[in-house]
Structures are given as structure tokens and as C-alpha cells.
Image (cartoon, grey):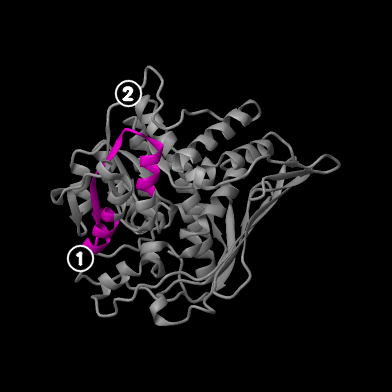
């Protein structure tokens, strides 16, 4: 089924190549004569659902890669992921006990082992230090979104991105929509002027509630790690962890131009119990641009409510809806992308392009745009937390560092509380 999905991606890309200019890649296991077809050794850091999914994407994208090392904070998570991946991919998963790493320093041991490609799929708070070490050791990287949970972390990522480019290492980020053939075509048409100059984007990410894992008798640090989504130092809050996809799409449509300021509001209405940590369950943010353009952003996580995840783009000559892949010029014919859309192809395409770049020794690196999208999400969070208008310059230079003073299961967790606008202080 996965190979068929890749085949569809390839055929869809071929069909639109003439109008989009999107570079075409071969299907998994099919390499040009000059490509290096040696076996690539993969290591996974973060063995949750997304990490296990990233391994599956890598396996399906490249016929000659092998999972040889795994790392997770908790051994039970690693063991479960290893079993499921072994059941699915057989001998292509070879992770003996000596290459199963746990604890806060496990990532260093994995990166120091004989791996070519590292998949960084832990809670986002760890992403900056994991990326820095992987680049230092000369590894190619797939890194899930978002890239940090504070501005200090984003600056660290930007420095690592620069070093990766200097070392000609490939770095692909998990902003999946940018690897979706249908959205690439739609956004290119917007960039080519199909709706004129973009004036407004309205993006929504209204979803249901999420998981809760319990473990109330653990140490505070272990408890927060198990339930990482509800703690800003680990997740960044859900605007940054989930809605960041929508924010990144807006940044993409705006050709990488960043807003000059953000204002917003948010709070907790449905997730008010202590077990839900310190994050909000809804945000509304307005991003303002030097050109006068604005991005209106809404996100919510609550059970039993209306769901909606869409992106509307309004220009001087028409409108577009990204999720539907529709463009409506004023006074012209509506364009709708032909064919059946499957977002799973984009998850696969990320890894097709990563492994293709490694094999052809033509490094690709989308880390800078991804780091800036992460900072844009953090800017919206801080605007809502504080109740203040936050400028891009302020956000980029912020000294905020949410990470703990010490990484250990018996260490103190960061001193944080549910933010109250008007009282919370932006750093």
C-alpha cells in the first residue's frame, strides 16, 4: 500500500511538472546511475507514534535503508515501537539491545553510533540540543515540527541550520504540507499572481481533545515527560505544536516574509483540570505585515465542538482555499486541482526527497524557513499569554529559555503556571 502511495505521488508530480516547476524524484529504490545506493543506517530518537511513523515513511521512501538504533526517554515506549516496526519491516529493523538507548543522554549515544540519518521525533523542547549534536557529528537529519519551544531554542536551531549547510548535510523538517504535491501546485499559482497581491489570510485549526497518559505517582519530571503536550517547555503549547502547520502555510504563501507584529488572545475553558498542565485550549491571533497584509489565525482543542481546518487566502484579483486546492480569480474561471488528494503522500515525500538528496550528494535544507515559522508560532503564543502586541524584533531577540536547569528524572521541573494575560511577563 505504501509503495502504491509513492507511485501515486510520482504520477501526480509528473502530471503537474510542466506548470509548477516542481523537481521530480524517482520512486523508492529507483536511483539514477550516478546515485550512491549503499545501505543507509537510520537511528530514531523519540519512539512515540510520530517517531514510529517517521521510520515507516523512511522505510517506504528508500528501499535500501535500515533501522539500526533507537532512543527514547522510557524503555517501555522503545520496546513497543521496536516490536511494531519489526513486525512490519522484518529484517530491515535490526536494533540489538546495545543499540537501544534510554535516558536524557541516550540521544548522544545514538548519534555517536554508526548511523547515517537521524530522525528527531521527541517532544519539541529537546529539538535544539538534539539537532546541534547531530550536526556536530555530521549526521543527516529529519526533524519533526516545531523546532523549539522558546526563542533561545530557535536561535540555536538557526545556528545548527547554518552549520549543516556548511557541512553539506541534508536537513528536512516535518512541515508536511510543503511536501504535498497538490499544495505545491496551488501555492505556486498564488505566487505566480493567480489572485494578485495577497492581502489577507484566514486560517483555522479547530479540533477535538487529545490524549492524557496519567502516571500520577511518578516524579514531577517523569510525569511531565509522559504528558509532555500540556507543558510549554516541552510542547510550546498547542498553537506551536499543532497549529504551527497552518502558520507555516501562511508563511509559505507570504513567500517567507515574516510579520512585523502579532496580537492575540486565548485561554482555558474546557481543559481546566490540573492534569492538563499549563497550556491553553484556544487562541486567536492577528499577524500584521509591513505591506498592510494580515493573517487571522484561530485554533482550538475541545471535545464536542465544531471542527474546521482550512486556509483562505484573499488577494487583489481573487481568492484561494489551500486545503481544497481551489483558486477563484475575480471574473475568471475557478481552478480546482484534479485528482484525488491523499496527504499521506506528503509524509512519504519528505523522506523521498531527504534520501534522494543524500544519495545524490546534493544536500537540501529547509531548516531556516521552518525555524522562522516556529518563531512565528511562539510570537502568537507570547502575544496571547501576555495580552501585549509583540513585534518580530522583540521575539527574535527574546531571552526566554523555558528549559530546566538540570535534565534528570529527579530534577525540578521548570517553574511555570497557567499564563494570565495582563500579569504574565514577556521576556
User: Would you say 61 lies left or right of 43 here?
Assistant: right
Q: Residue at x 68, y 46 (%)?
A: 291
Query: Horizontal placement of 324 versus 91: left or right?
Result: right
Circle 1 packing at 10 Å, graded few (<14), some (14-19), many (20+), is some
**Outermost residue toward the right?**
331
Residue 320 in picture, x, y percent from top left: 71, 47
Q: Nearer the viewer, residue 86 or 202?
A: 86
Picture residue at 26% right of the left edge, 71% below the top: 221
Residue 57 position (above or below residue 219): above
Span of residues in magenta: 54-83
- Residue 364, quarter of the rendered image: top left
Q: Nearer the viewer, residue 386 or 143?
A: 143
The mark found on residue 82 in the picture is none
> On the rendered structure, is 100 left or right of 125?
left
In the rendered view, would you say 52 is above or below 348? below
Residue that sits furthest to the bottom in the current view? 273
Residue at the disc numbered 2: 36
Residue 376 visible at all: yes
**Across the whole image, how many numbered discs are drawn on residues?**
2
Q: Kindly give the residue lying farthest to the left in the view shown.
A: 98
| Residue under numbered circle 1 | 408
Name the residue at 44% across, 76% down: 418
Q: Position of residue 186 (x, y in %)?
A: 65, 40
The percent position of residue 135, horizontal first and vertical second, equals: 29, 40
- Indicate the position of residue 136 as horizontal and vertical percent values: 25, 39
Query: In the displayed structure, does residue 80 sit left or right of residue 310?
Result: left
Is label 2 in a helix, a strand or a loop? loop
Above/below status of 343 relative to 381: above
Q: Quadrant of the C terminus?
A: bottom left
Element class at badge 1 = loop
Amino acid at each position: 500500500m505504501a509503495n502504491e502511495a509513492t507511485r501515486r505521488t510520482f504520477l501526480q508530480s509528473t502530471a503537474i511538472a510542466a506548470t509548477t516547476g516542481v523537481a521530480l524524484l524517482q520512486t523508492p529504490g529507483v536511483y539514477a546511475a550516478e546515485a550512491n545506493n549503499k545501505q543507509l543506517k537510520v537511528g530514531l530518537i523519540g519512539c512515540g507514534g510520530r517517531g514510529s511513523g517517521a521510520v515507516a515513511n523512511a522505510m517506504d521512501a528508500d528501499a535500501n535503508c535500515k533501522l539500526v538504533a533507537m532512543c527514547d526517554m522510557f524503555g517501555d515506549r522503545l520496546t513497543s515501537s521496536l516490536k511494531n516496526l519489526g513486525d512490519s519491516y522484518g529484517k530491515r529493523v535490526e536494533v540489538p539491545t546495545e543499540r537501544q538507548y534510554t535516558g536524557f543522554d541516550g540521544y548522544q549515544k545514538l548519534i555517536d553510533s554508526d548511523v547515517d540519518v537521524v530522525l528527531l521525533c521527541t517532544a519539541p523542547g529537546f529539538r535544539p540540543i538534539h539537532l546541534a549534536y547531530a550536526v556536530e557529528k555530521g549526521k543527516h537529519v529529519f526533524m519533526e515540527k516545531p523546532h523549539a519551544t522558546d526563542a533561545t531554542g530557535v536561535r540555536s536551531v538557526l545556528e545548527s541550520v547554518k552549520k549543516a549547510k556548511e557541512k553539506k548535510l541534508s536537513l528536512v523538517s516535518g512541515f508536511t504540507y510543503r511536501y504535498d504535491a497538490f499544495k505545491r501546485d496551488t501555492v505556486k499559482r498564488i505566487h505566480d499572481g493567480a489572485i494578485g497581491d495577497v492581502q489577507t489570510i484566514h486560517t483555522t485549526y479547530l479540533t477535538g481533545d487529545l490524549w492524557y497518559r496519567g502516571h500520577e505517582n511518578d516524579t514531577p519530571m517523569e510525569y511531565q515527560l509522559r504528558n509532555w503536550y500540556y507543558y510549554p517547555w516541552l510542547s510550546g503549547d498547542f498553537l506551536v505544536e499543532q497549529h504551527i502547520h497552518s502558520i507555516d502555510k501562511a508563511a509559505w504563501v507570504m513567500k517567507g516574509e515574516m510579520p512585523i507584529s502579532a496580537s492575540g488572545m486565548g485561554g482555558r475553558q474546557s481543559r481546566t483540570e490540573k492534569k492538563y498542565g499549563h497550556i491553553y485550549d484556544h487562541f486567536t491571533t492577528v499577524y500584521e505585515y509591513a505591506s498592510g497584509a494580515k493573517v487571522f489565525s484561530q485554533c482550538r482543542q475541545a471535545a464536542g465542538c465544531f471542527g474546521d481546518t482550512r486556509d483562505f487566502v484573499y488577494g487583489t484579483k481573487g481568492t484561494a482555499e489551500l486545503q481544497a486546492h481551489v483558486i477563484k480569480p475575480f471574473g475568471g474561471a475557478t481552478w480546482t486541482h484534479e485528482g484525488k488528494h491523499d496527504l499521506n503522500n506528503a509524509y512519504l515525500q519528505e523522506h523521498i526527497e531527504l534520501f534522494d538528496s543524500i544519495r545524490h550528494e546534493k544536500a537540501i535544507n529547509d531548516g531556516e524557513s521552518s525555524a522562522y515559522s516556529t518563531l512565528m508560532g511562539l510570537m502568537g503564543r507570547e502575544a496571547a499569554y501576555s495580552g501585549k502586541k509583540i513585534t518580530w524584533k522583540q521575539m527574535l531577540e527574546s531571552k526566554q529559555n523555558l528549559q530546566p536547569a538540570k535534565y534528570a528524572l529527579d530534577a525540578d521541573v521548570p517553574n511555570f503556571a497557567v499564563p494570565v494575560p495582563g500579569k504574565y511577563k514577556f521576556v
